[in-house]
């Protein structure tokens, strides 16, 4: 059985979500004058990224091929 891919770990999902949140926060900080709107945009981005990655991790199926063998015969 193959190991899980690197993008399916909790640490990598958190890093991706934080990077996306920082990007959105930087854009919204320059766009909005109100800190509440910036915080709402950052919160929605973080929750949406974490939720989406967790859902993709949940519905992905296990790779049943052995390493080094071709998938097609």
Image (cartoon, rainbow, N blue to C red):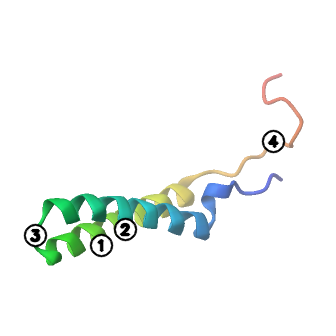
Write down the residue under mark 2: 46
Which residue appears at 25% of the width and 58% of the height? 27
The answer for how far apart the CA atoms under marks 4 and 3 are is 53 Å
Outermost residue on the right side: it is 68
Does residue 28 sit above or below 63 in this rendering?
A: below
User: Closer to the camera: disc 4 or disc 3?
Assistant: 3
Q: Residue 16: give x, y in percent of width and height.
A: 49, 60
Q: Quadrant of the rendered structure where residue 46 is?
A: bottom left
Write down the residue under mark 4: 65
- Name the secondary structure under disc 4: loop
* N-term mark: 4 or 3: 3
Q: Which mark is residue 33?
A: 3
Q: Quadrant of the rendered structure where residue 52 is?
A: bottom left
CB under 8 Å between discs 1 and 2: yes
Which residue appears at 23% of the width and 75% of the height? 39
Q: Residue 19: give x, y in percent of width and height.
A: 44, 62
- Name the secondary structure under disc 3: loop
């Amino acid at each position: 059985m193959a190991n899980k891919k690197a993008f399916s770990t909790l640490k990598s999902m958190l890093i991706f979500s934080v990077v996306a949140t920082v990007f959105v926060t930087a854009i919204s900080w320059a766009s909005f004058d109100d800190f509440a709107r910036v915080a709402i945009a950052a919160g929605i981005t973080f929750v949406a990224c974490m939720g989406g990655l967790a859902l993709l991790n949940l519905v992905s199926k296990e790779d049943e091929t052995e390493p080094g063998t071709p998938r097609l015969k």
